[in-house]
Image (cartoon, rainbow, N blue to C red):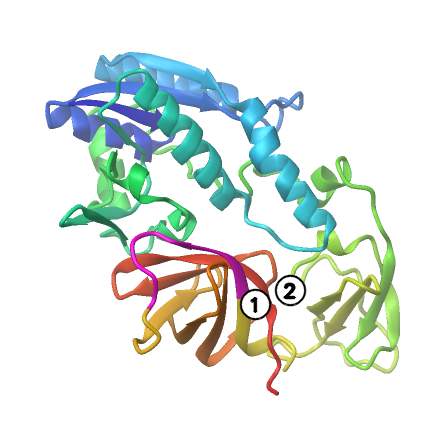
Amino acid sequence: MKIIVGMSGGVDSSVAALNLIKQNHEVIGLFMKSWEDDDLSNCSAAQDYEDTLKVCQKLSIPLKTINFTKEYQEKVFNIVLEQFHQGLTPNPDILCNQEIKFKCFFEEAIKIGADCIATGHYATIKNDNDNYYLCRSYDKNKDQTYFLYRINQTVLKKLVFPVGEMLKTDVRKLAKKNHLVNFDKKDSTGICFIGERNFKEFLSSYILKNPGDIVDDKGHFIGKHDGLMFYTIGQRSGLNIGGLKKYPEKPWYVLQKNISENKLVVGQNHNHPLLMQKKLTCINLHWITEQVNQKETYTAKVRYRQDDQKCEISVQNSSTAKVIFESAQRAITPGQSIVFYKKNICLGGGIIEGTITDE
């Protein structure tokens, strides 16, 4: 079987290719370029390509490159910028998976004769009577199904995750044993197109600052903010307020973003009532295999690094749902994704529209 592996220069995609070779598949590496950057001090694309090339040479497989910068600009970056401009907090990595890795890359791979594609994501796939289910990885700490919830059946049928049943520690050990140059390479962090650089500085080069008032939960003026797009719900650092008279010397947290009045609402309680909510609405729903049954109990995550939370899901229509959690969730953030699970299976999810206060 001919399998094209999306390779990023990291250890996970490299071991994905290695595992497929050991299974006697015909393997081709494909390196995707999706971001143009003149700031070489922050751009790791050149090093990532060099690492990918060395791995492919070691594995004796061909490497193809493809430039998706135009598609990324149009289908990911421009959309994300607009959402930031609206005061939302989007997740570019989820959109990148949907539009670039599992659409542009998938279509290109099939076009050049691939039977399947593979990536180094930590997830697994289950086939039940030609219904394909996206399931959690063996390494629960590395599971990436949260970022993959917008995948569809067409792609799942021709997709493999060769490291999905491995622990990350074993992935590195296998890479080292096979003398892969990136066996101890640090995992990439940060937003996909921003990376390690200063988020506020980067965003300021694309969106004009829109200063406004910072107020407490009673509406009292405290200070000024540079623009709601620079803050997220629950944020503690970077508020530049403190030492205020009439207030105790305690940390401040972002409680709400009043977009209509361009006001940032803050408070000093880590679990302030405005931060702890049990109900939300979500839009742009996407179901991978099956839609929820109102009578069943499900779990959900409103952020990647979160334990599963029991909830009831009430689907309003094809694109909207109301979710009620068993217990209050901290810092539910409009623009982020809520992802639904049925035990080990990732069902799909949607974009958080907002919270609902108790009627």
Residue 197 position (above or below residue 9)? below
Residue 8 visible from this viewpoint: no
CB atoms of marks 1 and 2 within 8 Å: yes
Q: Which residue is mark 2?
A: 233
Residue 317 position (above or below residue 273)? above
Q: Position of residue 183 (x, y in %)?
A: 31, 31
Taking the image as shown, residue 206 lies to the left or right of residue 357, namely right
- Which quarter of the picture shows residue 28? top left
In which quadrant will I find the N terminus?
top left
Q: Foreground residue, 235 or 174?
A: 235
User: Residue flagged by tag 1: what amino acid is it?
Assistant: Ile
Residue 327 position (above or below residue 73)? below
User: Residue flagged by tag 2: what amino acid is it?
Assistant: Ile
Q: Which residue is mark 1?
A: 332
Q: Residue drawn 72% across and 52% down?
A: 86
**SS for dot 1:** loop
Q: Which span is picked out in magenta?
A: 282-292
Q: Position of residue 94 (x, y in %)?
A: 48, 45
Give the mark nearest the N terminus, 1 or 2. 2
Taking the image as shown, residue 178 lies to the left or right of residue 352, namely left
- Which quarter of the picture shows residue 38? top right
